[in-house]
Amino acid sequence: TAIGGVTDVTIAVDVLTTAQNAYAASGLTAADAADTLFVGMKAGKTTVGELARSLGRVIPQATAVGLSFDEIVAATAALTT
């Protein structure tokens, strides 16, 4: 995730564990989160590192209102285009 997502390992691990912990009830795995981040990166004009910084602030509120990880990554990627 770090290499392909143009970021460092610390940031990649942080966003994956944050997503996995926040969406544990829905069964989100780190592999699923990484796949979603790559799709978001390719769909927008962004990197995994940039997504990670934004998502770190958004995930707690998104889970509180029932938004899925896929939805928040897609919305964030769309905002970059």
Image (spheres, rainbow, N blue to C red):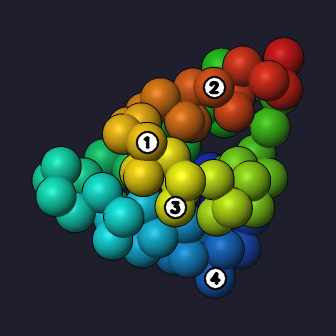
The answer for how far apart the CA atoms under marks 3 and 4 are is 20 Å
> Relative to 42, does residue 15 appear above or below in the rendering?
below
x and y percent of residue 45 in the render?
A: 83, 28
**Badge 2: few (under 14), some or many (20 or more) residues near its Cα, within 10 Å?**
few
x and y percent of residue 37 in the render?
A: 53, 43
Of the image marks 3 and 1, the number of the one nearer the N terminus: 3
Amino acid tagged 4:
Thr
Amino acid tagged 3:
Pro
Of the image marks 3 and 2, the number of the one nearer the N terminus: 3
The answer for how far apart the CA atoms under marks 1 and 2 are is 15 Å
Q: Nearer the viewer, mark 1 or mark 2?
A: 1
**Residue that mark 4 sits on:** 10
Residue at the spot x=47%, y=29% of the render?
71
Q: Nearer the viewer, mark 3 or mark 1?
A: 1
Residue at the spot x=33%, y=71% of the render?
21
Residue that extends furthest to the bottom in the rendered view of this protein: 10
**Residue that mark 1 sits on:** 65
**Residue that mark 2 sits on:** 75
Q: Is residue 49 left or right of residue 15?
A: right
Is 51 or 38 nearer to us in this picture? 51
Name the image quarter holding residue 19: bottom left
The residue tagged with tag 4: helix, strand or loop?
helix
x and y percent of residue 26 in the render?
A: 18, 49
Of the image marks 2 and 4, the number of the one nearer the N terminus: 4
Q: Is residue 48 left or right of residue 33?
A: right
The answer for how far apart the CA atoms under marks 3 and 2 are is 15 Å
**Residue that mark 3 sits on:** 60
